[in-house]
Amino acid sequence: MNGITRLCCKAMVGMVGLMLCLSTITLAKEPPPNIILCMGDDHGWDETGYNGHPHLKTPVLDEMAASGLRLDRFYSAHPSCSPTRGTVMTGRHPNRYGTFAPNYSIRPEEISIARILQQAGYACGHFGKWHLGPVKAASPTSPGAMGFHQWLSHDNFFELNPTFSRNGAAPEKFEGESSEIVIRETIRFLETAQQDGKPFLAVVWYGSPHEPYSGLKEDLALYSDLPDSYGDKQVKLTSNVTGRQTKRPLKDVLQERYAEITAMDRSLGQLRKWLQDNGQRENTLLWYCGDNGTPGDGIVTSPFRGRKGTMYEGGIRVPGIIEWPERIAQTRHSEVNTVTSDMLPTICELLKVPLPERPLDGVSLKPLIAGTMSERPAPICFWSFKGGGGADSEPYIAAELQSGTTPLVKMMGDIHTRNFRNFHHPDISPKDFDGHRVLLGNRYKLLVRGLGDEEQRELFDVRSDPGEKDDLITSKPEVANQLQHQLGDWQESVLQSLTGADYE
């Protein structure tokens, strides 16, 4: 090899090395994905056009389902709102930290997805319903205390012309359709994050379609021709006038409920348009879901048994869609069981940040997003805790820090605001294992309630029997016993967390 040849070879080797180095630098500087987590309030599985609803118009959700990853077996981790919201924040079942039911707060020691992403350099904002404690600045479980830099939030749910607290300040009233207000404020936050060159986490928790219902004239007009047969039934719900319970014809109630869902759907379109117009859509993971099944005043078309508050499919199976054009280029429908607790571990693995060092109940869905997961690696457990703070229980947070400020239409006793609670639970007793609890495997679903001689069990093959009509408890006792053993072990772990052991 002559000198010129050797020189050329060295130059080529150097050039290849430089290219590899530049490639590594480019990969290292690849921008992290933006994250937007949206949740409807009391929005059940069937209440979308893409799931075959005979009346509802949800063109944006339908488009998302047609372009992204449609999670056809997506579950809320609890059949009511506050507990489910806690699972999004923590990846943990709400019984681990005493968020047993609506108006039970989270605990300050919990590690939220916002705290994790804040440490990873994200701008974090919360908009809409919080319901994990008061949103005022003094609250140790406000969005700000749980890691959000900005928040325009409500202690509970809201209707037209809602009242919100901005960053914990005194409540202020906003005129207009609540879902569109929430998205307008979210977009303001996204614009600031973009100007600052930061990736963003936006948690958008709508107040719709929770009762009491109301809607804009143009949205109500879309549902003026609902079947007259709906008018023959009276349903109980809150009066927008008195804040107390009243009865109204189902037809009128559904017209307003569906108007709220359509407005919420339209606001999602406004959010997606901003992402598209500002070059953020490709690298933004947008995840929509409901927080529990449809309530009794709105459930007329569900193919499932049960409703909000129950552990049957109608109470915990909800819409679920992930849209992320950069990673999900073609539409896919997944039959893998997935749940709200999966959000935190999924996001952590996608961003390559460590998981909290405490028991988690969700699993990472990164393989599902990549198209390589065909079956869930672990069951999903559900549990409505029975009890949760008797007369002798010590409050976890002082009462004055648990009092809410943002008013809503529905009264609680004689007030229009919400107060929260959480209790110390230092000791575990046999009665703590009571309450309606469920283990959902990839095929079978075991439901248990009661203890000892009063115990009742049901077993369903939800793959072949999604309506849960055929109880297999007598024909497949060995399956039921195996699942119940797993369920008991899981309850032991949850109760250990409830004592505060995870914080030591």
Image (spheres, grey):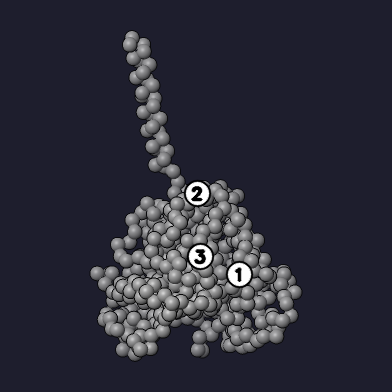
SS for callout 2: loop
Picture quarter with the N terminus: top left
For image coordinates 32% across by 69% down, the residue present is 109
Left or right of 360? Residue 410 is right
SS for callout 1: loop
Residue 144 vs 352, above or below: the answer is below
Give the Cα separation between the discs numbered 2 and 1: 27 Å
In percent of width and height, residue 372 lies at 45, 52
Residue 212 visible (yes or no) = no
Residue beneath disc 1: 47
Pick the residue in front: 229 or 268. 229
Pick the residue in front: 390 or 403. 390
Residue occupying the far front of the picture: 475
Q: Mark 2 packing: few (<14 Cα in 10 Å), some, or many (20+)?
A: some
Residue 272 vs 359, above or below: the answer is above
Give the Cα separation between the discs numbered 3 and 2: 21 Å
In percent of width and height, residue 350 lies at 41, 52
Residue beneath disc 3: 73
- Mark 2 in CB contact with mark 1 (< 8 angstroms): no
Q: Quadrant of residue 487?
A: bottom left
Residue beneath disc 2: 327
Residue 502 vs 375, above or below: the answer is below
